[in-house]
Image (cartoon, rainbow, N blue to C red):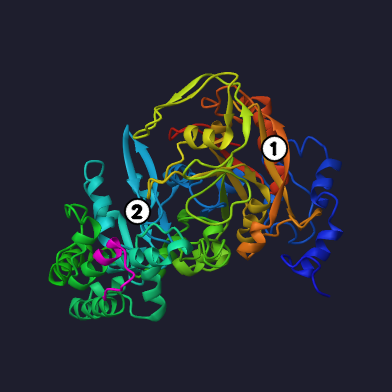
Amino acid sequence: GESFCPQVPAAILCRAAMDYSPDPRSRNLQRRSSSKTGEIGGLLPERKGSEFMGSDAASATGATQEASSKFSVVLGAQWGDEGKGKLVDILAKDAQVCARFNGGANAGHTLVVDGKKYAFHLLPCGIINRSCKNLIGNGVACHLPTLMRELETLKEFDPRAVERVFISTRTHILIDSHQIIDGILEAEASSNSIGTTKRGIGPCYSSKSIRNGLRFADLLHFETFEARLRELIRWSQKRFGEPCASDSDSQANLRKSLREYNTRNAFDPENGAKGGVGSIEEEIERYRGFAQLLRHQIVDSVTFIHEDIMRGNRVLVEGANAALLDIDFGTYPFVTSSNTTIGGVCTGLGVPPRVIDNIIGVVKAYTTRVGFGPFPTELQNEKQDLEDFYGEYFGEGLTIERKGDTRGPYVLKKGDRMKVGEMLQEVGHEYGTTTGRRRRCGWLDIPLVKYSAMVNGFHSISITKLDVLTGLKQIRIAVAYRNVEMTEVRLPSGYFPSHLRDLQKVVCEYETLEGWKEDISKCRRFADLPPNAKKYVLRVQELSGVPVSTIGVGPDRNDILSV
């Protein structure tokens, strides 16, 4: 029959009513209160067949799975910025191949090696391992000037780094006009703005889908490439270059820059100092140089990666963005333009599902997102003007510098009553590597994590930034969703609304855990963690139904413990 709550399908509500009492799996966990369920990464509820998350994670520790795997995938389980880079950096030490399969320069991570910071947007993390080959797969939208700038920063670290970077012949080339179009479209959206990074990712994937895009294979046939590049730019100018009466000053400048193909002016109208070119002819010559330099690095990626698989080499795949930004499974339309989940690995690299033997979901100990869209557990936003949730701080005193902030440093003292969302932003340094924007912050959202685990089939999860919660006297976890118009019924375990209006109607059921005040940054074993930190991790494992394999306990490269 018809749903008696229009925001949620009737079939979903029928199941919800049946599951009104706590999740049966949680009840099973409570009944099986043996030493096994209290072990980190230990046995979870018994299953029949392929039931329960679709993986064999419940029967083996995440650490064991990691150690024996030959093809590992690291994926973000939330809205991105979970700290995937640090885990991938560590795993890349033992990998022979490190690959990117999706996205473009809209993703970013910072690594510190020998005291020097490296910010990567396109290069796989394996570039820091001098014996590791790095593959940019066919599912990536690659802006070559950005890639070359990243390689330039590595010259001191490894003068021959470019020789370890391989790019699929099928990878699409993102050109400057894609970035200009991204800026024009974002400005046109006004109140319906998606909040993109304006790096041209969406327009590049659009070119791919309407089949007028350029691929790296085209660079190997430069006469054809030149003709097709001119054609693509003319197409862009015809459709987006003409001025409109409603244009803002910035839009008018972008359209003018596109008409003249002066991308230098588009990126930096005042000084023209942020890259770009002054004409189509300059663009063609720039790519001619790229083609000569990279001729031997452009490869048939399917053959390339399958040869390593056949040899038994360790392959590590890192995802850009995260599950809730997936073009199909994310909070559409506030998503990225590629498949960020496990299916994207197969289509973005040309590998069959059966070769993937270890899928790690990276889960921040709280939740963050950048840009617009519903956020059920949100405490504080980018502008820091939400009411927030007040909690008591009982840790050691902290003073955190805030560059460019007229309010001065962020200060916390023992006994302070503080805004938790703001504390997560400042203590967690929640500012985007790619955009510099302050991230929206909230409590850990278990229904979201369970949904992500269902879609991806995680063998284990890596909890990051646990140290940021240090000092909070009480910590909340969202354990279930309910609908605001029918709060007496839990929504089914793993259900995540596909429509924004339905997601806006979600209210969270919270569980409160006691916090800890001890510094955990020096902990290198699970046993070293304070009792309440252990309880938090174990509770996340129980609620998510996926073993925990690693825990991030501090900001430094080595502040991570395996379990």
Q: Percent x, y for residue 330?
A: 56, 62
Determine whether 82 is above or below 492 in the image.
above
The amino acid pointed to by label 1 is Leu
Quadrant position of the N terminus in the picture: bottom right
Name the residue nearer the viewer: 60 or 527: 527
In this figure, which residue is indicated by the disc labeled 1? Answer: 538
Determine whether 396 is above or below 151 in the image.
above
Disc 1 and disc 2 in contact, CB within 8 angstroms = no
Report the side of 7 relative to 213 (left or right).
right
In this figure, which residue is indicated by the disc labeled 2? Answer: 123
- Is residue 347 visible in this depiction of the protein? yes
Question: What is the total number of numbered labels drawn onto the structure image?
Answer: 2
**Quadrant of the rendered structure where residue 272 is?**
bottom left
- Residue lying farthest front? 245
Secondary structure beneath dot 1 equals helix
Determine whether 15 is above or below 436 in the image.
below
Quadrant position of the C terminus in the picture: top right
The answer to which of marks 1 and 2 sits earlier in the sequence is: 2
Would you say residue 250 sits in the magenta stretch? yes
Tell me which residue sits at (80%, 59%) in the image: 48
The amino acid pointed to by label 2 is Leu
Name the residue nearer the viewer: 77 or 268: 268
Would you say residue 458 sits in the magenta stretch? no
Mark 2 surroundings: few (<14), some (14-19) or many (≥20) residues within 10 A? many
Q: Percent x, y for residue 390?
A: 62, 32
Mark 1 surroundings: few (<14), some (14-19) or many (≥20) residues within 10 A? many
Q: Percent x, y for residue 228?
A: 24, 80
Secondary structure beneath dot 2 equals loop
Per the rendered image, the range of residues in magenta is: 242-253
Report the side of 25 relative to 362 (left or right).
right
Q: Percent x, y for residue 512?
A: 72, 35
